[in-house]
């Protein structure tokens, strides 16, 4: 844990507490707990979406943190929650559009030749994908017989 | 070991730490070593746990009260639980990456069973290398953790005996204080934080003890 060693003892020790400061730190810790709850709920609701950043910069613990450091963690959590909400909102929009596209593709496969939509594209778990392909290969291509084929899932 | 024999010892918490973190505590039991290879009943239990534990459990684990309590505490002491994982989340990640809770040795397997079943953070020390009672305190000026270069930043949270730090709280163990293959007496300690019920701590220590006495 090299970050432990990067801090000088002077930096690391919170100012000796008086009652008000301890109350402030307690309030900061309460806010951190509340924000951690929100981030936890977002994490569960985000599954199975990938490539979402969840890190919040640590303060080089395990230490008794000062009020300023607790504030930084609280703000980091709040910013992370806002970022994740934004990312999930964008993804939800794209996934809704992809679901609509999939419905149209299933209804009229010949209009969406060779198009492929995966579970990930519509925000679902698993490795299945829908693929618009010609029936009977070349013959289907020539006469315009297309269908949507659903793959069997994840490879073992 | 019978159930009646198992009474966890309660450790001390420095007043400053207790003031800042109400609910923090440390308790421990002594179990017999040496650790060695796990007996079949312990391996079987790991396999059963592996079969019961799936991706959904890992995803929703942090929503459960005890794993969540440790996540919050990690944040409050300056650790990011997505980088420095809580013990139960670290095991869950290993399970998902490895496809199973893999048997390593008797002590590690017993700790895995107890941590996964209860969510409580456990760690082990060589009983003979612990002087007096265990506790949690802040490091003092100029204090070092054996086996690591440099001084600990003043104010570092450590698990300590009555003479020296034995390890960082939720971090590295001091050189020579951890369990070795030949260790005869093992101290298994549970670190409790706000939101973790006492009964869960007792269950974790009891589960680990029973697993260590198996075979």
Image: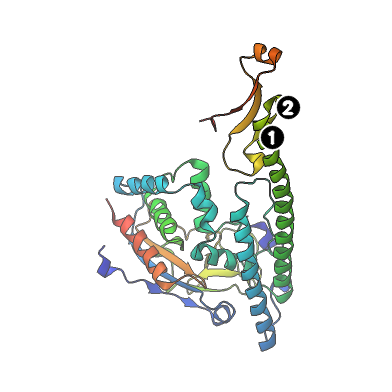
x and y, in percent, of residue B29 in the image: 37, 67
Say which of B65 and A70 sits in front.
B65
Q: What residue is pinned by disc 1?
A: A104
- In the rendered structure, the answer to whether residue B108 lies left or right of residue A138 reads left
Residue name at image x 62 percent, y 38 percent: A119
Q: Residues within 10 Å of mark 2 (few under 14, many from 20)?
A: few
Q: Earlier in the sequence, mark 1 or mark 2?
A: 1
x and y, in percent, of residue B15 in the image: 54, 82
Label 2 near label 1: C-beta < 8 Å?
yes
Residue name at image x 63 percent, y 52 percent: A46
Q: What residue is pinned by disc 2?
A: A111
State the SS at label 1: helix
Say which of A111 and A63 sits in front.
A111
Q: Are marks 1 and 2 on the same chain?
A: yes
State the SS at label 2: helix
- In the rendered structure, the answer to whether residue A14 lies left or right of residue B192 reads right
Residue name at image x 30 percent, y 45 percent: B40
Say which of A120 and A52 sits in front.
A120
Q: Is residue A75 above or below residue A46?
A: below
Where is the N terminus of chain B found, in terms of image quarters? bottom left
């Amino acid at each position: 844990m090299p970050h432990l060693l990067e801090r000088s003892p002077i930096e690391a020790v919170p100012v000796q507490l008086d009652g008000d400061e301890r109350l402030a730190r307690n309030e900061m810790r309460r806010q951190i707990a509340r924000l951690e709850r929100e981030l936890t709920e977002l994490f569960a609701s985000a599954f199975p979406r990938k490539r979402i950043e969840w890190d919040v910069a640590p303060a080089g613990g395990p230490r008794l943190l000062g009020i300023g450091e607790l504030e930084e963690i609280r703000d980091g959590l709040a910013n992370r929650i806002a970022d994740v909400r934004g990312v999930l909102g964008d993804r939800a929009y794209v996934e809704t559009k992809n679901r609509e596209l999939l419905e149209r593709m299933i209804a009229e496969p010949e209009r969406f030749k060779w198009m492929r939509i995966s579970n990930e594209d519509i925000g679902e778990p698993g490795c299945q994908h829908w693929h618009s392909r010609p029936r009977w290969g070349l013959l289907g291509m020539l006469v315009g017989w297309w269908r949507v084929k659903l793959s069997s899932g994840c490879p073992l | 070991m019978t159930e009646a024999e198992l009474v966890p010892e309660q450790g001390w918490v420095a007043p400053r730490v207790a003031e800042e973190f109400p609910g923090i505590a440390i308790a421990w039991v002594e179990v017999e070593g040496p650790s060695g290879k796990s007996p079949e009943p312990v391996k079987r239990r790991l396999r059963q746990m592996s079969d019961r534990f799936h991706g959904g459990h890992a995803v929703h684990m942090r929503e459960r009260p005890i794993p969540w309590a440790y996540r919050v505490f990690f944040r409050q002491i300056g650790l990011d639980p997505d980088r420095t994982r809580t013990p139960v989340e670290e095991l869950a990640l290993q399970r998902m990456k490895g496809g199973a809770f893999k048997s390593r040795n008797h002590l590690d397997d017993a700790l895995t069973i107890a941590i996964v079943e209860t969510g409580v953070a456990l760690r082990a020390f060589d009983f003979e290398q612990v002087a007096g009672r265990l506790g949690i305190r802040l490091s003092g000026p100029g204090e070092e953790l054996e086996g690591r270069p440099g001084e600990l930043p003043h104010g570092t949270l450590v698990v300590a005996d009555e003479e020296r730090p034995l390890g960082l709280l939720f971090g590295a163990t001091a050189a020579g204080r951890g369990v070795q293959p030949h260790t005869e007496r093992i101290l298994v300690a549970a670190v409790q934080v706000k939101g973790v019920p006492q009964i869960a701590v007792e269950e974790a220590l009891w589960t680990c003890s029973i697993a260590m006495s198996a075979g």
